[in-house]
Every structure is written in C-alpha cells, then in structure tokens.
Amino acid sequence: MTDQSCHTDHYAVLGHPIHHSMSPKIHAAFAEQTGQQLSYEAIDVSPESLQTRLTQLPKEGFCGVNITVPHKEVAWQYVKQHGLLSERAALAGAVNTLAWTTEGLLGDNTDGQGLLNDLQQRHGLSLAGKRILLLGAGGASRGVILPLLAAHPAALVIANRTAARAEALAELFAPQRANCVLLGCGLGHLDRLTASAGSFDVVINATSASLGGESITLPTGTLTSDAFAYDMMYGKALTPFLQAQQNAGVRHLADGLGMLVEQAAVAFTLWRGVTPQTQPVYNQLRNDLSNK
Ligand code: NDP
C-alpha cells in the first residue's frame, strides 16, 4: 500500500532515453478505468544522476516509479542499499518498479509476471514441459528467468552474444531449476546444442538487437515446426527478429506490447491495491501503433 502521507500520488517512469515510452499512456488509462487519482510522467534521467534523482523523488511527493533501460540493475543496487527487495527482484538483480511505502522503499520486478500473463493468458501458450530458448542475458532476461522456471518447462537455455553472461545466469538460477534442464551458452554454440539436445518449442528474444534494427539468426533446426516466437520489443510492424522467424516458416509470432501492458498492470496493483483490466488498454495501444 502507498504511504498515506504521500498526498499528491505522483508516479513516473525513469529511463534514458525516455521520450518513446508508452508507460504514461498506459497508467493514465488504468487510473481512469479504476477511478484512481494520480499523475504519471516520463522523466529522462542520465545514468550519472540516477541515484541522486531516486533520493529526491519521494521528497517531491512521488509514491512510486517504474525503471526502464538502462537503469534496472543500478536501481537494484540502490534499493539493496536503501530499502527492501521482493524475492523475485532480489534474485533477478534488476528492478522495474519502486514504491515508497510506510515500510520504506520497496523494489520489485514485474517483467517476468508481465511476460507470463501475456504468453499464457493473451496468447494461450502453456509452458509446462516445453523447451524454451531465451535470447539475451541483460536486465530483461534476468527478470523473466525465475517466473519462466516456475512455469515448469522441460528445458530453459539462455543464449547470449557474450556467452559468459548467459553461463553466469544459468549458474545463478541453478538452485531454482527443479527438474528443468537449465543451460547458458553463446549464440554461436546454438547449432551444436540443438544438434545434441533437440529443437525448441518457444523462443523469446530478450536482446536489444531489434532496437537497432538488427535480427538474430537462428541456425536451421533450432525451432520445432510448430514453435512460438516472441520478441520483447514491439512496433507498428513485425520486429526484425519476428520478420526473420516468419521468413523461416514460424507461424506463431507475438511481440512485447502485451508484456509491456501486463508488467505495468502488476506495478499498478502493487501501488494502488486495485487490478486494472489490461485488454482494453492493449487494444487501444495496438490501434495507436498501427495508425502511426
Ligand atoms: P540490456 O541492455 O540490459 O541487455 C541487452 C541484451 O541484448 C544483452 O544480452 C546483449 O548482449 C544483447 N544484445 C544487444 N545487441 C545485440 C545484438 N546486436 N545482437 C545480439 N545480442 C545483442 O537490455 P534489457 O535486457 O533491459 O532489454 C532488452 C530488450 O527487451 C529491449 O529491447 C527492451 O526494450 C525489451 N524489454 C521489453 C519489455 C516489455 O515490457 N515489452 C520489458 C523489458 C525489456 P551482450 O551481453 O553480449 O551485450
């Protein structure tokens, strides 16, 4: 619950750059739908000034903030020093949601829950028993590993441009893997891994390659014939990654717009104690994107 001394109910998203952020629109829609009185703005914060800004914000009447690229890991360090981390955020090593509450500063990571809500509820995908390939080992990837493991896949392979980062993540989450095969490798080792261990049912692109208009080439045979390809990035048209998968014959494709709306809804619930409906907001944003 929000600290009641926080009368103005200001919220914001902090990132760098931030002008493209759809979060103000999403939270304004949630607030209208649920009758909550609040303001939500996008604030551009450079990496050098993040810690100072986080100290100032509660004094300026802010009750909570979302954290986006490139601040998730530094904000995690800040909460570790000055507040409390949720269990999922503590393990992820990255936060995307902060709340200044009566108990002090709380740091959470709602990205993983947002991804799962989108995959399972919006796209009707069951992850139990599936072989999942997660591309990338940055803040977004860290945030989704624990919730993905909790969905009981048969295997989760983290593949990254810098192999050592993927291997480190697989080692970090090994105690949570239960019966799941959890491996980290370089993108360049995928062909050997697939040849020896089999194809994947689901691929999730958590790299920022699509942001730069680049795709990631998956060796032939990486995916099963009925695979589902997901890119956390989203846009008016298919992202370069999804376009490449479609060209390779993958029929089930989804971008990260739903994840964006779902992770925001989990943060909104944490701050306000009410859960907004996500589908009308998702439909509106999809419509706005296609009219751009
Ligand atoms: P980070 O900067 O923390 O990590 C970037 C990752 O992408 C690293 O693993 C990096 O590899 C890899 N990478 C970057 N460029 C390339 C490339 N050209 N080829 C291959 N790999 C590359 O970013 P985040 O993890 O925070 O975000 C990743 C993506 O997920 C972004 O596009 C972001 O917008 C999106 N996202 C979407 C969300 C949503 O709600 N839809 C929520 C969170 C993130 P290396 O380690 O080798 O540098």
Image: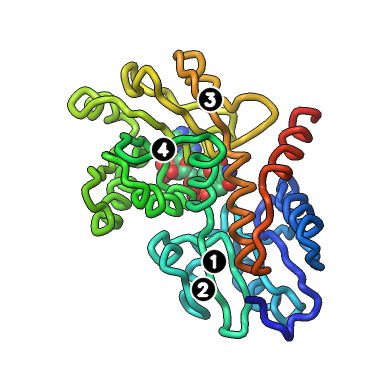
- Up-down relation of residue 145 to residue 230 (above or below): below
Q: Secondary structure at mark 4?
A: loop
Which callout, 3 or 4, points at the residue further toward the start of the chain? Answer: 4
Q: Secondary structure at mark 3?
A: helix
> Which residue, given by chain and number where applicable, does mark 2 sit on?
79
- Left-right relation of 158 to 213: left
Q: Amino acid at mark 2?
A: Val
Q: CA distance from mark 2 to mark 4?
A: 34 Å
Nearer mark to the viewer, of 4 and 1: 4
Q: Which mark is residue 242?
A: 3
Quadrant (top left, top right, bottom left, bottom right) of the N terminus = bottom right
The answer to whether mark 2 and mark 4 are in CB contact below 8 A is: no
Seen at 68% across and 61% down, the residue is 45
- Left-right relation of 181 to 257: left
Nearer mark to the viewer, of 2 and 3: 3
Q: Amino acid at mark 3?
A: Leu
Q: Secondary structure at mark 2?
A: helix
Q: Secondary structure at mark 1?
A: helix
Which callout, 2 or 4, points at the residue further toward the start of the chain? Answer: 2
In this orientation, which residue lies closer to the viewer: 279 or 47? 279
Q: CA distance from mark 2 to mark 3?
A: 35 Å
Q: Quadrant of residue 212?
A: top right
Q: Which mark is residue 126?
A: 4
Q: CA distance from mark 2 to mark 1?
A: 6 Å
Q: Which mark is residue 75?
A: 1
Q: CA distance from mark 3 to mark 4?
A: 20 Å
Q: Amino acid at mark 1?
A: Ala
The answer to whether mark 4 and mark 1 are in CB contact below 8 A is: no
Which callout, 2 or 3, points at the residue further toward the start of the chain? Answer: 2
Q: Position of residue 168 (x, y in %)?
A: 29, 52
